Amino acid sequence: MKALIAPDSFGDTLTAVAAAEAIAAGWTLGRPADELSLAPQSDGGPGFVAVLASRFGDVQTARVSGPLGAIVSAHWLLDRREGRTVAYIECAQACGLHQLGGLPTPRTALAADTFGVGELVAAAVAAGADQIVVGLGGSGSTDGGRGLIDGLGGLAEAARLLGPVQLVAASDVENPLLGPDGAAAVFGPQKGADAATVALLEEGLADWAQVLSGLAGRDISDEPGAGAAGGLGAALLALGAERVPGATVIAEATGQADLIAAVDLVITGEGKCDEQTLKGKVVAALTTAARGRGIPTVVLAGQVALTPAQLAEAGITLARSIVEVAGSVEVAMDDAENQLGELARQVAEAW
């Protein structure tokens, strides 16, 4: 049997690349005769660059400003093929939650910015990129992309630099910039914001939205994806970006359709398989593609919170969680690689 192993990252415990390798190791123990293809996935958040770099391109490193101003080492990808130069940037490399130096707080929620993302975009322009794809997700900031604009030298300079560039915002988030479904209200608490801080962030985003709308020549605050990565999506949209689901970017860049067509089984996974999974995330996108070809899909996740009926409706053939093997969420997270491998072995033996 031929199987495609194509997981997303497992939150902060396993990168998509590490998860794919762990699943492959366990599956091989359970079914040593199977032919496995590994294709780690991403929705634009942490791991976006690593997943693409496992397939093509040249990894670049830049020293840029982190979310709280400290200098961080950020990786991005440059791909020169067929007469084009495409840069892939992962915003979390420059403004990620993991770079706050500790747990997020109301203070960090207010202070974190996207200046370093602007520096990465500027580096991509300087390298001759005619297309820049920015993966959005995992940010610790809610500045509406104001830092990005500052990192590019201001509104006028940002527009000048990016005028000739095809800009793509890679994200599965459809939230607007403002309001109860906006960047501050929905994602602010995940970044340390309490109720008072959310209100301050919302006020700042409302003022900034007017500036961005003036730049774009239209109201961008309600556009789908404007609230992605703490409103970084809004700044990119104002600069002319097209929003594309991150999973789609990965699928097209890695030839996912051809990979699926060549196998008998798709094995994917993520940290938590829940209702968010069904809203266009990696697992759902893969399952839909496989289902269209009559190929079964197995999901190995940290936790599974979908009912059998929901799984069946989504087209997922089988879903198992690491917690079943580990016995607790704590062990599942602390020993994720080994526990995921053991889960894969058990599923493979029973398949």
Image (cartoon, rainbow, N blue to C red):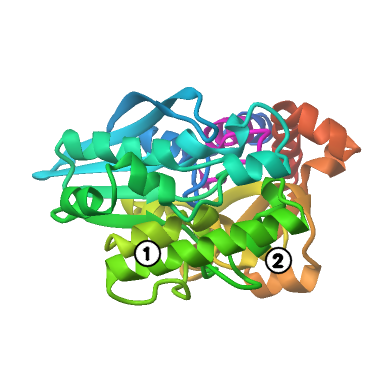
Q: Is residue 242 above or below residue 98?
A: below
- Residue situated in front as seen by the camera: 349 or 217: 217
Residue at 69% over, 34% down: 30
Q: Are marks 1 and 2 in contact (CB under 8 Å)?
A: no
The boundaries of the magenta stretch are 2-24
Secondary structure beneath dot 2 equals: helix
- The answer to which image quadrant residue 202 occupies is bottom right
The residue positioned farthest toward the left in the image shown: 83
Q: Tag on residue 275?
A: 2
Secondary structure beneath dot 1 equals: helix
The residue positioned farthest toward the right in the image shown: 327
Give how far across and how far down residue 196 sits, in percent. Answer: 74, 57
User: Which-is-in-front pick, marks 1 and 2?
Assistant: 1
The residue beneath circle 1 is 211
Residue at 16% over, 52% down: 160
- Residue situated in front as seen by the camera: 328 or 207: 207
- Residue situated in front as seen by the camera: 139 or 329: 139
Q: Is residue 281 left or right of residue 263?
A: right
Q: Tag on residue 71?
A: none
Residue 269 belongs to magenta span: no
Give how far across and how far down residue 229 sits, in percent. Answer: 52, 53
Amino acid found under the numbered disc labelled 2: Glu
Q: Is residue 304 left or right of residue 182?
A: right
Q: Is residue 245 left or right of residue 124?
A: right
Give how far across and how far down residue 162 sits, in percent. Answer: 20, 51
Residue at 52% over, 35% down: 67
Q: Is residue 50 left or right of residue 139?
A: left
Residue 22 belongs to magenta span: yes
- Number of marks in picture: 2
Give how far across and how far down residue 294 sits, in percent. Answer: 51, 68
Amino acid found under the numbered disc labelled 1: Val
Tell me if I can see residue 348 in this picture.
no
